[in-house]
Image (cartoon, coloured by chain):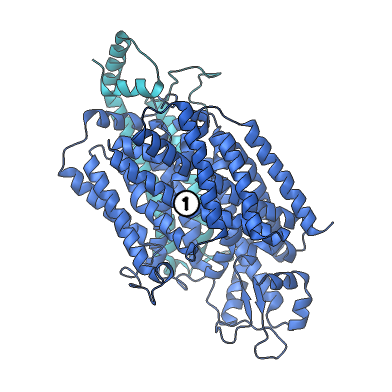
Amino acid sequence: MSLEILTMILIIVTFAIYTYIGWWAKVKDTKNFYVAGNEIPAVANGAAIAADWMSAASFISMAGLISFLGYDGTIYLMGWTGGYVLLALLLAPYLRKFGRYTVPDFIGDRFYSNGARAVAAIATVFISLTYVAGQMRGVGIVFSRYLQVDIVYGVLIGMAIVAFFAVIGGMKGITWTQVVQYCVLIIAFLIPSIAIAYKLTGNPVPQLALTFSDIAKRLNTLQIDLGLKEYLKPFQNLSLLNVLCVTLALMLGTAGLPHVIIRFYTVKSVRAARWSAAWALVFIALLYTTAPALGVFAKYNLINSINEQPIEKVRQVEWVSKWESTGLLQLEDKNENGKLEFSADKAVNEVTIDRDIIVLSTPEVADLAPIVIALVAAGGLAAALSTAAGLLLAMSSAVSHDLYYRIFKPTASDLQRLKVGRIMVFLSVIVAGWFGVHPPGFAGEVVAFAFGLAAASIFPAILLGIFDNRMNREGAIAGILTGLIFTIVMILLMRSVQIFGSEKAIINSFFGINAQGIGVIGAILNFIVSFVVSRITPAPPTDIQQMVENIRIPKGIGEINT
Amino acid sequence: MKSGLTTYICKITNIKINTGGIKMIDKAHQKTTDKQKAYWRKNVATIRNLLIIWVLVSHIAAILLAKPLSNIDFFGLNLAFWFAQQGSIVIFVGLIFYYAWRMDRLDKKYDVQEIRLTSNKKSNKGASV
């Protein structure tokens, strides 16, 4: 059976399962639509959060990205996991106790201001939209690469599936679908990793193989011999200051991403919110500790099987010719000595590797059965679809719940709001699909935006709302605006080449901090401004202060009410 | 008199309590205030300690002290690299599990476990995961 047919069958089977679950979990009221009626068990919610969090980029690109950054790849590993510690300790239990639907809900109610609510809602839509565009693109790429379908049709099929179970099932459908999607994506990630770990080191556990074998040191020596940067030494690609700031910005941003926070409203108790975060990080850590090991193995194997080898012999290897034809692997015998040679110098380097190939080619490199290759395609799709679904829901609830119901039409009935919610999911899918087919030229830059904005606006506002009883409307709004404006202006100035098409960046860095790390400075400014302004303006009303006291203790949790 | 807290509880639990009930809850609320403050202090202290470990294993060991620690061998890796790409993540998981476990015990000790005020669901085991 050909690989295309096998992949097609596996994708159809997994999609059928997702669709069935979406139908099985269909909902009839807003509470189930937004927060799944708060009856999801902690372990299941943990798996759903993990699937929601791990996007097509985590699944396909991260291991490759790390293998090229070496030590400094830790910015993604620690940044995207360390944020969960902040979430679990500082935000999740209290937001669950607060017991509403969305992030803007908390900010609007806690700071008794529809202005703050609107700012938070708009930030939510912007952050989620930048994210979802990338997911739709990921769906399109998987379809076009594995099934030779045109990328436009790939995106359209993905849109239809996401829209179906998000519109019908709401949060309940999404949550249970994501549990299954987590299983698909982690199995698809682990099987090739285990196989290549065993092949290279004799130890089947990737994490142990990385730590206890000498493979990382061999790769390090190999890289030095080739004139590439040392793999095991810190700060070869980024300065210490940037590694520190980017890691922190990704941590704060993770804790402030609306589609992640919203998951903690779906658990049934404060206690379950704490345990859900714990399980979520277990499931995430499984992939995030495997990825750096896979990065080392795959890169070592790739260099070893290509470097100094005759080009004709290399081209006969099946996976080499396949990936060369996709353009992700470029071989060119520049000095015409018949051999391929790696070099740090671009002019003489004869092998160019796209980072995505690290994960995508592993099953073939490790001689695994075609079913595993098909599984990796299904896993990439699962990662993209589950993240897209969560983002769509976060976006649609910010518009339909916060902007429409809480600000414009407080008299709207349950049925009307459910209808607006579904229309919003539908519209979001179309917008996301459009961006998937016509990706903006600066797609890579918007991720820096999303994390920077979440770190500089949402995270400080929620944290102060819970831990500082004296924080008032004036302080919070001044802080959010300072953080947002500073971060947006800085990123626009630093990335002016990609965004405005200027000849060179207007400023290169902010005292040595790059665009990815600037959210930390935005967050610090937010904290300072909020604190100062709140202390020179009147204290919040007593009922707000009592609400803060109330969310600090688990006792007295109730059903979510509108 | 209906206090803000009671109003809020009524609001979030969607139940109607008669005036007598509200007075009872008000009294109970005042009595437990000191206890709740002690609970909150313990909670904040726990969070502070765990975040100190969080900073130590990530920002300190893997970033600020990365240069010196990368000269110390740790099996097939060096110590800084292990913290940066394996150890910190494993310790993060441990921190969150410890916090969830520790807060379960604090909730019991200070008697602030959540109780379901509405019981239209199958069970009223509000504290079960």
Q: Is residue A556 visible?
A: no
Asked if residue B40 lies left or right of residue A328, the reply is: left
Name the residue carrying label 1.
Answer: A129
Q: Position of residue A244 (x, y in %)?
A: 39, 62
- Residue B109 to residue B17: above or below: below
- Residue A225 location in percent, x, y? 59, 82
Residue A19 located left or right of residue A437? right
Which residue is more in the foreground, A350 or A404? A404
Q: Is residue A438 left or right of residue A401?
A: right
Q: Residue at x 66, y 72 (%)?
A: A327
Q: Colour of chain A?
A: blue
The answer to whether A560 is drawn above or below residue A241 in the figure is above
Callout 1 amino acid: Leu
User: In the picture, which chain is cyan?
Assistant: B
Which residue occupies 33% across, 72% down? A507
Which percent across, then down, holds residue A87?
Answer: 43, 44
Nearest the viewer among A154 and A224 is A154
